[in-house]
Amino acid sequence: MKPAKANNSQTTIAKNGANVPPSNGSAGIPARDIADKNVRAPKNAAVRAGEFAGKVVLVTGGAQGIGEGVALEFARAGADVAFTYLGANSKSRAKAVRTAAALRKLGARVVFDAVDATSEQAAEAFVVRVLAELGRVDVLVNNVGGAGTVPEGGFVGLPLDYWRSQLDKNFFSAVIYARLAVRDMLRRRSPGAVINIGTIHTAKVFNTRFVPYSCAKQAMNQLTRDLAVELAPQNIRVNCIAPGLIKTALTKWRYDAAWWADVNQRIPMRRPGSPAEIGKIALFLASPRSSYLTGQIIYVDGGGADGGWKL
């Protein structure tokens, strides 16, 4: 009896420790992700209905906040969902597992992992896994970002390392994922959509302490415009959603009731937005209903850019 033939397929290792599955399947998935199998729809599941049935959306930073809201809206519309999340600690992992379970409950197949958004190698490892398990990327939502903890001292005192970290997180992460997703769209000669998540801070100066964040997001705005022009002949549309104040689990505890009451009076619509409202705009931008819309920066802020409020 002949011995079993060895499997010579190679599995590479990304900087963050994630295994890159070989092109012929999903082998090489880290052991910690075996538990993910129970939040993926079975391959023999009934064909799903919905505007995005058969489509795959990739959301960076999709475990919570705006990213979670976007992912849930696409799952409700029939899409399968891949998402990344930040932080490899047990709390972040538990939240990601809960989000994946919610997506699975809506019928979506789900792939997710903790990924360093600023690492090209880690991002490529994740996208290779998504393509191996879900087959394609039709819609990319670049959601990772944020100002983080702003150092004190004003412009002169802001360390260059903080400037670089803001560009990495809020701009270069979008460049990295757009390159990977668009490569797949072009390879398949398929229409696609790239949706960048910007900020109201690019509309005017709200707080000078956020200048590195605002500059990085302005770079994302210009990336949106330039990519839209380059990719329009291939029917790949690129737009940017610039949210105002969105009430998420993070912003709920960051500010007290008095702050919320004051800010609500400064926003013309007298309230913050919700992650689901951003998700619905993302659905529109990825759908045929916006088939002639590309290169646009859309402020979803309840009129806040003109309302005079400050963070």
Image (cartoon, helix red, strand yellow):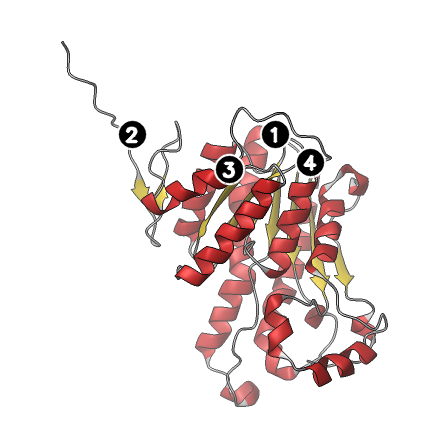
Q: What separation in Å lies between label 4 and label 2 (alpha carbons)? A: 33 Å
Q: What separation in Å lies between label 1 and label 2 (alpha carbons)? A: 28 Å
Q: What separation in Å lies between label 4 and label 1 (alpha carbons)? A: 18 Å
Instruction: Name the mark nearer the viewer: 4 or 2.
Output: 4
Q: Residue at x 72, y 56 (%)?
A: 278
Residue 243, quarter of the rendered image: bottom right
Front residue of 259/147: it is: 259
Of callouts 4 and 2, the N-terminal one: 2
- Whole-percent x, y for residue 169 in the image: 51, 64
The residue identified by callout 2 is 9
The residue identified by callout 3 is 40
Quarter placement of the N terminus: top left
Count all numbered tags in the image, as a single digit: 4
Q: What separation in Å lies between label 3 and label 2 (alpha carbons)? A: 25 Å
Front residue of 222/136: it is: 136
27 in relation to 144, above or below: above
Residue at the bottom extreme? 153
Residue at the right extreme? 268
The residue identified by callout 1 is 189
Q: Amino acid at mark 4?
A: Phe
Q: Amino acid at mark 3?
A: Arg
Badge 1: few (under 14), some or many (20 or more) residues near its Cα, within 10 Å? few
Q: Residue at x 35, y 33 (%)?
A: 27
Of callouts 4 and 1, the N-terminal one: 4
Badge 4: few (under 14), some or many (20 or more) residues near its Cα, within 10 Å? many
The residue identified by callout 4 is 52
